[in-house]
Image (cartoon, coloured by chain):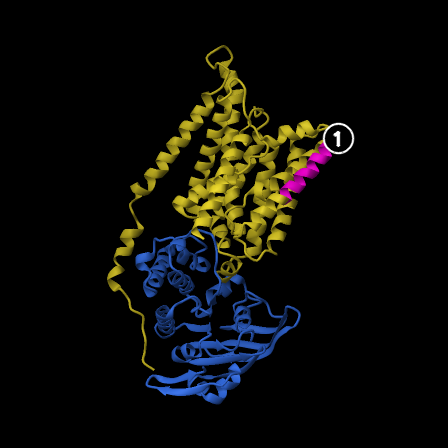
Chain colours: A blue, B yellow
Amino acid sequence: MITLENVTKTYAGETTIGPINVQIPSGGITSLVGPNGAGKSTVLTMMGRLMSPDSGRITVGGLDVAQAKSNEVAKTLAILRQENHFVTRLTVRQLIGFGRYPHSRGRLTVEDERHINEALEFLNLTALQDRYLDELSGGQRQRAYVAMVLAQDTEYVFLDEPLNNLDMSHSVQMMRQLRAAADDLGRTVIVVMHDINFASRYSDNILAMNDGQVTHFDTCADTMKSSVLTEIFGTSVRIIDDIDGPLAVYF
Amino acid sequence: MTKLSPTRPDGLVTSIGASKNPGLWSRTWPLLIGLMVTLSLIIASLFIGVYDLSSEGGREMFLITRVPRTLALILSGASMAVVGLIMQLMTQNRFVEPSTTGTIEWAGLGLILTYIFIPQPSLMLRMMVAIVFALIGTIIFFAFLQRVALKSSLVVPIVGLMLGAVVGAVSTFVALQAEMLQNLGIWFAGSFTGVTRGRYELLWIVAVTTIIVYFVADRFTVAGLGQEIATSVGLNYRAVMIVGISIVAITTGVVSVVVGSLPFLGLVVPNIVSMFRGDNLRTNLPWVVMVGIVVITLTDIIGRTIIMPFEIPVSMILGVLGATVFVYLIVRRGRRG
């Protein structure tokens, strides 16, 4: 379980977030949605202890992320931010290997190699494992980062807009893989999403934010209602019932 | 909702082991060839010179100048190349090394000030002051870097070069006032000419720092993935940066005092190695060390032989070589977009 108690954050002088009080249950996929500047990424970043809140307490799986030892936190949660631009030339396999850093401190054991192989296989990267990251397409690279995060073998996985820069088919593929990570590997996945339809189709819960506040937290079925979505996004949203479930239309 | 699962090419799993272990031999022979090239250059360095070693006192001369000079080449070449690489990982910028961040110039300023305030300073004192100044300069550079959004941009080395130029100008002004401009000139022309027995031993310090790098290599590679990824996998980013900056300052300070400035060595070597072998620091370290030794020994041999019996300072040849590689890297990056 992830608990946020009275979490606040002020930055750039005026943007204020919180106070946020929310409990996200373990298991499944929870999507963070909301308009730009609502504070979704900031909240995710604070949950992943890459940024500390001004006040309040965040616990993930019972660990206070601000107090616990960084290496302990790294065995409980893994976070991937949107922009991962680095000049280091590593192969896909080497990158994923560094996901094992909290467990092995760099000297890979047989156990680590097994996790790396599984992550490669899980994201269909086995054939690309010896390629350098700068030789890959944007979608392939994104998969490599996600594989690294999964190889870290943490119960909680936080991803900040994993569909960014992905085309339609790669987006679908990525969401299926995340779904499988939740269902087959038992991970608790929290993602920041832009597309409400992607969010509703692949996640279990939707947490909506607006102006730095959590305005709505419910199951997908209860969120996919015209009145609710119109309020969340500040633009009129209709719901169409498709064979696979409700679809939001907002054109 | 229908349950979705990713497609898994199970057939590929068995091939992982095969492609991962290309055999001990095929991994070892390039290293052996590299080792042989390095060793033959070292031997060449030992036997190239004006003094006829077969004459009387040849053995003496060999031990007083040739051996120390060659050891100095090995130690400073290896350590400066490694320092360049860890700076590039820490800054996430391919163009960074002690001479494009002002670190060397700061060490130089420290040296000049020591000469002015303390008549006949000991080697140890000069070294300490050079290290402290290199540390200050590197910290200033990293403090600046925190304010740059795009860390891979060319702005980083440009500002570093400007910082270096300003500090260098201060050194020149101070030296001019104290009528020590000639000393400064000699110092800036990093050269192995004066490296003899009793003058190179401090360089063993950088052997120690290079060995330390080997043991913490993975931390630097992880730090090279950026603060966020590094933190996510539980690395103490701040501690790694402090260790890294200290290693950079100590190495640059020591090499500056004993040899002088060795521009671009830390830029050229890691970039060459990275092109062929990527950037996994621990597995690359032997290569960075070897190529560092090869480049510096080769440039020193060229400097010693082209106008025999005189010598051209190694820093001059390194400058020409380094500037060429620097331009090449920029152009190559430009083409890639």
Residue A55, by quadrant, is: bottom right
At mark 1, the secondary structure is loop
Q: Is residue A12 left or right of residue A23?
A: right
Horizontal side of residue A164 vs A117, given as left or right: right
Q: Chain of mark 1?
A: B
A31 over B110 or under it: above or below: below
In the rendered image, residue B88, in percent from the top left (x then y), is placed at 51, 47
> How dense is the environment of label 1, judged by Cα within 10 Å: few (below 14), some, or many (20 and up)?
few
Q: Quadrant of the C terminus of chain A?
A: bottom left
Q: Is residue B30 above or below residue B159?
A: above
Residue B314 horizontal/vertical position (percent) = 53, 29
Left-right relation of A151 to B260: left
Give the residues drawn in magenta, as a range: B163-178
Residue B129 appears in the figure: no
In the displayed image of the protein, which residue is found farthest to the top?
A: B56
Residue indicated by mark 1: B178
What type is the residue that disc 1 sits on? Ala
Work out whether residue A40 or residue A112 is closer to the camera in this orientation and state it: A40
